[in-house]
């Protein structure tokens, strides 16, 4: 098990959303499922469950379920193809934003 504390500033582009600082924690559950809980100034509390499934050495599937008191439920599924150690090609679908593709960088 692993506990991670996090804090930052959320720029919210959702209708009715607010920008503001947030703090929270992330915890690794059994079967490598990550659970995160954050609280933002202004009263928004959000919870998230996320699982990464490695399909091959270079291809993985990321699944997530998010719930916010004010934002409701959202889900997403993303395929990630590892190009180099620092760069991946990603394609996915979000219940909030629809389909999308992009490049993911790690540093």
Image (cartoon, helix red, strand yellow):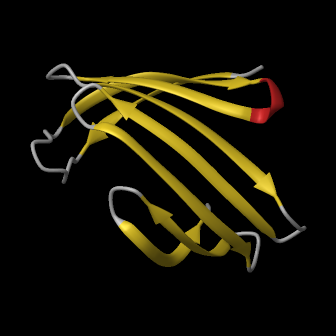
Residue positioned 57% across, 58% down in the render: 77
Residue positioned 75% across, 77% down in the render: 84
Which residue is most to the right?
A: 57
Query: Relative to the observer, which residue lies in front, 86 or 10?
Result: 10
Give coordinates of residue 50: x percent, y percent.
61, 40
**Within the image, what quadrant is residue 78 found in?**
bottom right
The N terminus: image quadrant: top right
Give coordinates of residue 61: x percent, y percent.
70, 60
Give coordinates of residue 44: x percent, y percent.
24, 25
Give coordinates of residue 96: x percent, y percent.
33, 56
**Total labels drawn:** 0
Instruction: Relative to 65, say whether 102 is above or below.
Output: below
Residue positioned 39% across, 32% down in the render: 67
Whether residue 14 sits left or right of residue 39 in the image: it is left
**Within the image, what quadrant is residue 97 found in?**
bottom left
Query: Relative to the observer, which residue lies in front, 100 or 40?
Result: 100
**Within the image, what quadrant is residue 4 found in?**
top right
Whether residue 15 sits left or right of residue 85 in the image: it is left
Whether residue 44 sits left or right of residue 6 in the image: it is left
Whether residue 100 sits left or right of residue 8 in the image: it is right
Residue positioned 15% across, 41% down in the render: 17
The C terminus: image quadrant: bottom right
């Amino acid at each position: 098990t692993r506990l991670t504390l996090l804090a930052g500033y959320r720029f919210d582009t959702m209708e009715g959303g607010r920008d503001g600082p947030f703090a929270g924690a992330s915890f690794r559950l059994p079967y490598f499922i990550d659970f995160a809980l954050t609280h933002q100034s202004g009263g928004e509390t959000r919870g998230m469950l996320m699982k990464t499934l490695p399909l091959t050495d270079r291809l993985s599937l990321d699944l997530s379920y998010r719930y916010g008191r004010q934002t409701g439920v959202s889900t997403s599924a993303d395929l990630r193809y590892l190009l180099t150690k620092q760069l991946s090609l990603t394609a996915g679908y979000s219940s909030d934003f629809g389909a999308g593709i992009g490049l993911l960088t790690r540093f």
